[in-house]
């Protein structure tokens, strides 16, 4: 196997998002903004919230791509204009295909907002090919126990396979274009060769400890862009965790404005008009009598 080597190291920067929560963002970052088909990667936390402190992203729209939320610690709550409501806890993934558009709110769960707690997770944005940008929105919400995972025979490296395959396990999530999304946890002394389809663009993001990536060190908060090859050799002398991401590049024009990612400027203008005209919908907030005995609307 020809190993892919790191051709570029990107150190994530801190960024404020949504209602004001802080993320570590390696992509986009400075001059690194072309990871086709990936548009953004945010690491939320780890952060310890006091009661009443937890922040999220209230109602906002998306069109033309997918948002993938992976919770490691804590609990996230979701509501949208299509009437979908969900809550995902540690180890769970929500793969949301915005397609032609939704308006949604992504918040820490009510329990976390009221009582506080520790939050850690990721949000990845995956671009959609031109032919899929206006498809109907779709959700794949997968609890921890349904995300395939495997451990190497020596017990030192474990992978959770969110998309693609690893160590003989195939993901249950369906992607519109070929994507690999692995979460690797390495114990001291672990060494593993990870196959990555040669035609994919690929990177590794370390979020705990330090890893050797095809012989080059990468520490927590750093993203290593991988060059050509068939896979990557991961090794750790201490405890380390990383995401391995790869995808078939779309090689299409990208027009991007905040929560809309299309192919042309004209399509972006249309998305803004449609959103302002209410065509992406709004979140219904009538509450049940159980939550609100007076039956008032809030
Ligand atoms: Fe969102």
Image (cartoon, rainbow, N blue to C red):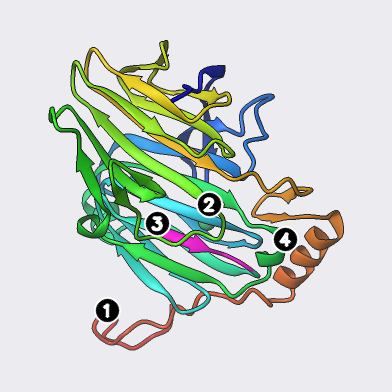
Q: CA distance from mark 1 to mark 3?
A: 18 Å
- Classify the position of the C terminus by image quarter: bottom left
Q: Residue at x 43, y 23 (%)?
A: 221
Q: Residue furthest right?
A: 266
Q: Is residue 95 left or right of residue 34?
A: left
Q: Position of residue 249 (x, y in %)?
A: 64, 44
Q: Is residue 273 left or right of residue 4?
A: right
* Residue under label 2: 178
Along the line of sight, the residue nearer the viewer: 192 or 58: 192
Q: Nearer the viewer, mark 2 or mark 1?
A: 2
Q: CA distance from mark 2 to mark 4?
A: 15 Å
Q: Nearer the viewer, mark 2 or mark 4?
A: 2
Q: Position of residue 266 (x, y in %)?
A: 86, 60
The segment highlighted magenta reads 95-99
Is residue 19 visible to us here?
no
Along the line of sight, the residue nearer the viewer: 228 or 272: 228
Q: CA distance from mark 2 to mark 3?
A: 29 Å
Instruction: Label 1: state its secondary structure.
Output: loop
Could you tell which of marks 3 and 4 lies nearer the N-terminus?
3
Q: Nearer the viewer, mark 4 or mark 1?
A: 4
């Amino acid at each position: 196997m020809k190993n892919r080597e790191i051709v570029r190291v990107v150190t994530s920067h801190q960024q404020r998002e949504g209602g004001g929560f802080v993320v570590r963002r390696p992509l986009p970052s400075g001059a690194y903004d072309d990871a086709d088909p990936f548009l953004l990667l945010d690491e939320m936390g780890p952060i310890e919230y006091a009661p009443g402190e937890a922040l999220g992203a209230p109602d906002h729209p998306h069109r033309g791509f997918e948002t993938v939320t992976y919770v490691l610690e804590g609990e996230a709550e979701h509501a949208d204009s299509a009437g979908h409501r969900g809550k995902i806890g540690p180890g769970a993934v929500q793969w949301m295909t915005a397609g032609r558009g939704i308006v949604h709110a992504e918040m820490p769960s009510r329990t976390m907002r009221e009582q506080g707690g520790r939050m850690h997770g990721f949000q990845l944005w995956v671009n959609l090919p031109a032919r899929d940008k206006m498809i109907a929105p779709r959700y794949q919400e997968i609890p921890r126990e349904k995300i395939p995972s495997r451990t190497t025979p020596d017990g030192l490296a474990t992978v959770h396979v969110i998309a693609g395959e690893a160590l003989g396990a195939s993901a249950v999530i369906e992607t519109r274009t070929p994507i690999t999304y692995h979460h690797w946890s390495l114990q001291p002394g672990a060494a593993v060769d990870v196959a990555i389809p040669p035609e994919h663009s690929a990177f590794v993001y370390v979020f705990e400890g330090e890893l050797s990536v095809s012989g080059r060190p990468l520490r927590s908060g750093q993203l290593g862009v991988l060059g050509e090859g068939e896979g990557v050799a991961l090794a750790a002398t201490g405890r380390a965790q990383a995401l391995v991401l790869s995808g078939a590049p779309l090689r299409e024009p990208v027009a991007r404005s905040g929560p809309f990612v299309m192919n042309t400027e004209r399509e972006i203008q249309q998305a803004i008009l449609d959103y302002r005209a209410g065509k992406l919908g709004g979140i219904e907030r009538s509450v049940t009598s159980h939550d609100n005995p007076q039956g008032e609307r809030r």
